[in-house]
Amino acid sequence: MSEQTISGTTAEAPHAGGGGHHHPQPTSFFRRYVWSYDHKVVGKQYLITSLCFMLLGGGLAMLLRWQIAYPFVPVPFIGHWLKGMFFFGNNGAITPEGYLELGAMHGLVMIFFVVIPLIVGGFGNFLIPLHIGAEDVSFPMLNALSYWLYAAASVPMLLSFFVDKGAAAAGWTNYPPLSDIAGASPSSLGLTLVLVAIYLAGFSSILGGVNFLVTIAKLRAPGMTWGRLPLLTWAQFITAVFQCLATPMLAAGASMLIFDRVFHTSFFLPSGLMVGGAAAANSGGGYPLLWQHIFWFYAHPAVYILILPTMGIASEILTTFSRKPVFGYKAMVISLASIMGLGFIVWGHHMFVSGMNPMLGMAFMVSTIFIALPSGVKVFNWLGTLWGGNIRFDSPMLFALGFISMFIIGGLSGIFMASTPADIYLHDTYYIIAHFHYIVFGATIFAVFGGISFWFPKFFGRMMNEPLAKLHWLLTLVFFNLTFFPMHFLGEAGHMRRLATSTDYEFLNSLAGLNVFITWSAYYLGLSQLIFVFNFFHSMFYGKKATENPWQGNTLEWTLPSPVPYYNFDVPPVVYRGPYEYSSEEAGDKDWISQSTPPVPGMTPAKH
Amino acid sequence: MEMTANATEAAFHRKRADMRRFGMWLFLGSEVMFFTGFFAAYIVIRSASAGSIVQPLNKALGTLNTVILITSSFTMALAVLASKKGDRKGLVNWMGLTWILGVVFLCVKGVEYAQHFSEGIYPSTDIFHAFYFLFTGFHALHVIAGLVVMGVLWFRARRGDFNETYNDPIEMMGLYWHFVDLVWIFLYPALYLL
């Protein structure tokens, strides 16, 4: 019987994380780089795929900006080559339909195919097992599956650009009836394909979330208590709760929208709807507002999926380069958790002008403004971490400082958006575009650049080129602000978002010059990213070989060789202290002491 | 030597079963949120509509299916129990019966769908039938997915893969099957009775 057990299980689970079953690294190219169960390979797959999609999403934004600055002027070069295709009319200028498509797809690609897979799939997969001292995640096969579901999701998304009438063009939020009836929005099959893509990407995200929660709860090394968990891993844990509980709501909403589009049901269509001057064929009986509630019940928590992990990245970098423990570790964890708790009850602040009951608007305003509290705690704690620190200005630190600065600006403009009276004026203007780009680009993507440069040694065994990384930081910071700060002024002047023809409105004419300025800043911002692309790939192959612990960090990944070997830890580590014991007495003449360094006899490990 | 190998093996199974159990509960939690989305929409549209949106369904077949599915949950529980005792014959028989009941459930559902289509009723007919097809369609997809996995497990059980120490795939199957049953227990009154 026992013989049978052993043969049965080894055949069934050749590589279960944390079980103590060591198998040699697979030798075939396919098992090593394509269908790999190794969390580090899956993390890199996510990282590189999502960075490639960032080029696509960024490219869409560049075209978008051309149309705003130079409405209906043929796009140089690209428009000439692609006349009459994709977003371009026969003269090579962007059509109004093409413009809507660019806007919707820029948002959808950036959120579902870039940021979430990048910071959760990429950083989470690679770092969580290293941070907690595990061999791998709990369910390695499920992990590979979740990456390939994400890759599969990109197929219908990319395909949608090529079908008749193009990709989704009803905003990234896909509000019905625009998104619901063929003929109401410019796209037809393309929008359905994009919904299918979101569906698959969401499923991948749920599986990833389940995997992370189980991994962090069950596979922590001996001594790695919840209070000694690095903040990035805490942030990933809390993000994973969002992924498990909020993403299914998007799946429910998208199912109903797909039913409406494919089977002609009317979940989101009212009775007596007129489309194009004729009564719609649908039976009616549904509510367009219902979609907004279901969508934002997911999409607002999703906004926190876009920022919480990078808050963790910023915390890791700030403490390491300040040579000081994180200020208020517990407060940091509690504020992360309260952002999550509050994040589930604020979705209505996206709907202040939707016709929702004004009393509800009041409640959502209050709950939203409460989020300023934990966010403020985090900002003050980051500043407290810097205070009196022995600060090193390496490129990861510069990006982390950029993160805090941009997060403060984006956070402050958020308070205006959260207040119903101000929002009624600012809603759907460029003010909101400025606000969320400060958070998602200014904060999240800055932390991503910092994180890539910080963990590059662990990812690829080499260092990134430091002068190039600093140049990239400087240009990105300058052109980012030149691009997005003036958008606040556009918004205050009443410039609507999703508007292909701003020249049609006399009151917007005075803003034309500002729009040209923003567009050129955006182009320089885009060009600056090429420095990163070059640095990333060049350093991967030709960068300086990295030592084990180039930044003198304390967390467990810095005890491993660079790059990290196949099974991570030769001997399972034992953890004796918190993750941020910089400059503690225990360390002796160094200012850092690894979490797994055994304590010196007669000295108790510090308690933070 | 043999003893320690077995002890390590058993500890490995316990640890992995523990992780799988937690993972399954989390997955079912996300499934609950998925169906909650539909129920929330259904409640909102039913209570906000001026008149009643409810249309008659075939109560006899709906009730029959409820009985079938609850019975299958019971037989599934007996299968899990048999697997914990290491009773291979009991496991194979009870799980086989559960699988057959699942297929019968789908057949009855198919008869109901056929009746609707023959009467010219489709998801697009009205908002009530839109919900009816949405709910029962996604529930049926969950039943089908469960039956596929259960089929694989049945062959593995017959081959003798499971015993007292290693049986967590059967336990996970049981959790999932009870969940699918539970969803139906909410669907049945919401669509057929209320």
Image (cartoon, coloured by chain):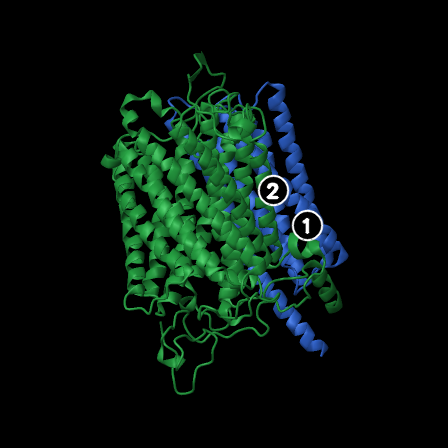
Label 2 in the same subunit as label 1: no
* SS for dot 2: helix
| Nearer to the camera, A332 or A395 | A395
- Judged by depth in the image, the label closer to the viewer, 2 or 1, is 2
Left or right: residue A356 versus residue A464 is: left
Residue A132, given in percent of the width and then of the height, sits at: 49, 66
- Residue drawn at point x = 38 percent, y = 30 percent: A69
Q: Mark 1 lies on which chain?
A: B
Q: Mark 2 belongs to which subunit? A: A
Secondary structure category for the residue under label 1: helix
Q: In which quarter of the image is the C terminus of chain A?
A: bottom left
Residue plotted at (61% across, 41% down):
B143
Q: Colour of chain A?
A: green
Q: Residues within 10 Å of mark 2 (few under 14, many from 20)?
A: some
Q: Identify residue for label 2.
A: A152
Residue A226 showing in the rendered view: yes
**Image disc number at residue B74:** none
For label 1, count other residues whose C-alpha is less than 10 Å away and answer few (under 14), some (14-19) or many (20+). Answer: many
Gap in Å between the C-alphas at discs 2 and 1? 34 Å
Rendered residue at 49%/38% (across/down): A59
| B192 or A385, nearer to the observer | A385
Query: What chain is the blue one?
Result: B
The three-letter code of the residue at mark 1 reads: Met
Which corner quadrant of the image does residue A423 belong to? Answer: top left
Q: Name the residue under label 1.
A: B95
Three-letter residue code for mark 2: Ala
Where residue A77 sits: x, y (%)?
Answer: 52, 31
Is any part of residue B25 visible from this angle?
A: no
| Residue extending furthest toward the top | A278
Give residue A262's quadrant in the image.
Answer: top right
Q: Position of residue A128 (x, y in %)?
A: 50, 61
